[in-house]
Image (cartoon, helix red, strand yellow):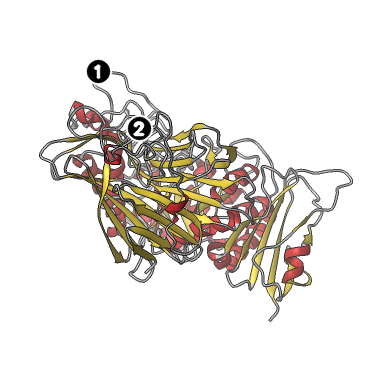
Amino acid sequence: MAIRIKDNVFTLQTKNSTYQMKADDKGILLHTYYGKKTDETDYSYMISMADRGFSGNIYEAREDRTYSLDFLPQEFPVCGSGDYRVDCLHADLGEGVNDCLMFFDSYRTYPGKYSLEGLPAMFASQEEADTLEILLKDNQEEVYLHLLYGVYENYDIITRAAVIENRTDREVRLSRVLSACLDMDHDGMDLIHFYGRHAGEREMERISLFHGITELRSTRGTSSHQHNPFVILADKNTTEEEGNCYGCSLLYSGGFHMQAEVDQFHQTRLVMGMDDSDFTWSLLPGESFVTPEAAFAFSSQGLARLSHCYHDGFQGSLIRSSWKNKRRPILVNNWEATYFDFNGDKLLKIAKEAAELELDMLVLDDGWFGKRDNDDSGLGDWFVNEKKLGCSLKELVDQVNGMGLMFGLWFEPEMISEDSDLYRNHPEWAMVVPGRKPIKGRAQLVLDMTRKDVLDYVKERLFSIMDSANIQYIKWDMNRSVAAAYSALLPRERQGELRHRYVLGLYEVLEELLQRYPDLLLEGCSGGGGRFDAGMLYYAPQIWCSDNTDAIERLNIQYGTSFGYPMSSVSAHVSVCPNHQNGRVTPFKTRGICAMQGTFGYELDLSRMTEAEKEEAREQIHTFKERYRLFQFGDYYRITSPLENRDFTAWEYADKDGTEAYLGVIYTDLHGNPAAQSVKFRGLLPEGRYQMWKDKEPAGIYTGAALMNGGILLPVPVENYDSCQIYVRLEE
């Protein structure tokens, strides 16, 4: 077991890291160490005790003024303890104030991984992970805090979650319950986070933490385009290949809150959990509240190694889909080909071209249901518009299947249009504040997913459509943020529970959908990448990365996404030029190379492609099918950053055993009389001899040591946004 316990010192060991905490003689659970793997020494000797002016002392410290929670490192700091730093719990235990102080009570360990009722969580067999559960208790009331730790030794991941349990005879009011805290004994760290907007998600930014609080959050009801619930703390000198860094990923698809504080004694604290800006929760006697899970990882070998922890861990022990170890279908989606202007004949024409190109699937996007010829109407009326299609959905799907293609369908089940039969029949199902005009987004309202009757309706309509035809893929969209939300069934004093209950309702529907259709491939989407989080990966093994399909802007988006998410989860397509989002023109080859960073497909009218483009597409499809195991399961390396290199962006997939590697390069600037450009491979065997191909042309034999240390010269670009592919394989 990777959990060692001695004298109330808890040491969690992974392959390359050690995490330690200690219940001290006062009963406070202190955090003592997280970093490079070491022995089981009690590292609390590194905590400096002193009389710190204006730092209060808990009563249990008696006359010892050197003992204060205002500066001690803790596992789960709470409000009301005399610790004035950011904390994880605000709980009114009955006196109208947040006055809580948790002391060590007991612990237990067991093989395997804990689960969380109604919430996504990483999973494991009894051999793959171990669980530590530490029980804390308030010093006055029968309120208990269960701290859960899941230790993945091979992934270098430690998961965290908390359960608040009310064993009193009266209500406990929660107004803040975060998932986890990480206390560091030093400052001078960088915070790496991923901000953005619709069509420009997960832009990587690295900032120096200052004395005070740095805060990221989403109050939008989803994890959002604007900020992602994944952050990294890194030493100043940390690079892709060297240095210490700590990752924290929240497995939750609603709003979130992250705070990083550098305190008066130059210590750094990170807390992460669900959004608490408009949150209250009534915890009745006998009830418990479960927080979302947070997954921590540590690397002493730079950012690439940290990313590999998350890539491997999420691929192996978070994604459950039957598609997790299969090649994802190469599909064509009709959205940018037709938008709402289609009929059955148009779709079959695209399908015929797709079959000739040896694609795997046709996906029918928005507009197939209700009265839906634009985005102002029809949401909620999930009944097939057979007049528009010219046939039943089953007849259409059967014809597509007859061409050798699978069939997929777009849904947006969480939304309702004012111009819909559903709204006319059930206006109370929309989350609208009584007596006030609603806040609309994309001309639509949000269904109240906290209501059982709404969930039952959504399930019935989904299952009815799924049962009517051979649908093997669903694109699940959500095209607005939650604002001015209100549930007609929740009493006024419990409206603060609405946003979290909404997410729980969403998870309930997704879980039932996947249990009913275990072979379904579910793709997440929220206006593109507005709900790209680890929580959603538990249900959907891939997520539409962004509505922006421009290959050059996708370099930034996919670069940022790669830090915390496996590239097999990044849905990416080749679209038409001029690009529909920004008007840019890029070569067809370049669009394909960019899209092959993730799950590969097309988002255009195949029938309007030139013969040269079709031939290029055939080559792209062949390459992706030939290399899919490398793309889906290989180690992904960010060779250059699109934020730092003006001339080109390069990335690599290397097989884990070093037998082969693929390098993609896209040029983003051109120069007269250009300087030579070179890159170095990573992840190869130094003593191995590798045959190289550049754009399928043989390009010599080199040792792994030469490719990783000397590097290779890149071809000189011959047109704007040119690109190349370089493949190496061990000699047979």
- The residue nearer to you, when weighing 337 against 7, is 7
Q: Residue at x 35, y 32 (%)?
A: 56
Q: Earlier along the polypeptide chain: callout 1 or callout 2?
A: 2
The kind of residue tagged 2 is: Gly
Q: Nearer the viewer, residue 417 or 258?
A: 258
* Residue 331 spot, x, y in % from top left: 51, 56
Q: Residue at x 43, y 63 (%)?
A: 40
For the question of whether residue 13 can be seen, the reply is yes
Corner quadrant of residue 414: top left
Front position in the image: 434 or 165 = 165
Residue 518 at least partly seen: no
Quarter the C terminus occupies: bottom right
**Label 2 belongs to which residue?**
56
Label 1 to label 2: alpha-carbon separation: 48 Å
Q: Residue 673: where, in percent of width, then height? A: 89, 46
- Tag 2: Cα neighbours inside 10 Å, few (<14), some, or many (≥20)? some
Residue at image position (55%, 36%) is 209
Residue 21 in the image, given as x and y percentages of width and height: 38, 54
* Residue visible at 15% across and 35% down in the picture: 171
Disc number placed over residue 68 in the picture, else none: none
Crowding near the residue tagged with mark 1, few <14, some 14–19, many ≥20 C-alpha atoms within 10 Å: few
Q: Which residue is mark 1?
A: 435
Mark 1 residue type: Gly
Vertical arrangement, residue 640 with respect to residue 419, above or below:
below
